[in-house]
Amino acid sequence: MRRTALAGLALALGLVAGCSQARQAPSEVPASAFAYSDARKDEIKDLWIQIRGWRVEMGLAGAEPNRALKTRMTRTTPVSALRRVCEPPPEPSPSCTDVCNLAEAICDNAGDICRIADELADDYWAKEKCRSAKASCKEAKEHCCGCEGENGHNPAP
């Protein structure tokens, strides 16, 4: 009977030790893996904040893109296609040139945000920022294309 108790105790200690080791496994993930992800998210955040500022500077309806448009933006919608949604004015006025340059900058940032989001693979937050950036790119390009300058409708403030 004493042997059975000792065997049971040894078995219990082995199970506890095994569980303890299994719980320690996640701490073996290098901290650099988390730092990489955080640095990439910071880069997305910085690019996205720039887009928000440029939207306001262009006179778009708020710092955030249209919710319905944002919802329609898919992972497969390339930024390059959004750049071609319309034709900008052939000879833009200086104010329209500014609006169109801001639209190009917004689309550049959208491309960078989406590239980083793809690198982060399954990060929902990053993919949402990509969709928001794509929607801003589309709105900005349409704003550029509708610009008529100082003598006509001028969407820039």
Image: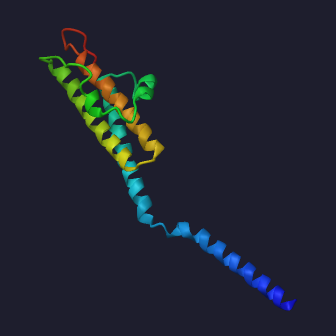
In the shown orientation, is residue 154 left or right of residue 5? left
Mark yes or no: residue 157 visible.
Answer: no
In the shown orientation, is residue 2 left or right of residue 28? right
| Residue at image coords 42%, 61% | 33
The image position of residue 14, as x and y in percent, is 69, 80
Residue 34 position by quadrant = bottom left
Does 52 sit above or below residue 26? above
Of 115 and 12, the residue lying toward us:
12
Residue 149 position by quadrant = top left
Of 85 and 38, the residue lying toward us:
85
| Residue at image coords 32%, 44% | 115
Q: Residue furthest bottom?
A: 2
The image position of residue 21, as x and y in percent, is 60, 74
Applied colour scheme:
rainbow
Residue 96 position by quadrant = top left
| Residue at image coords 28%, 20% | 143
| Residue at image coords 45%, 47% | 122
Quadrant containing the N terminus in the rendered view: bottom right
The image position of residue 6, as x and y in percent, is 79, 88
Quadrant containing the C terminus in the rendered view: top left
Mark yes or no: residue 31 visible.
Answer: yes
The image position of residue 35, as x and y in percent, is 41, 59
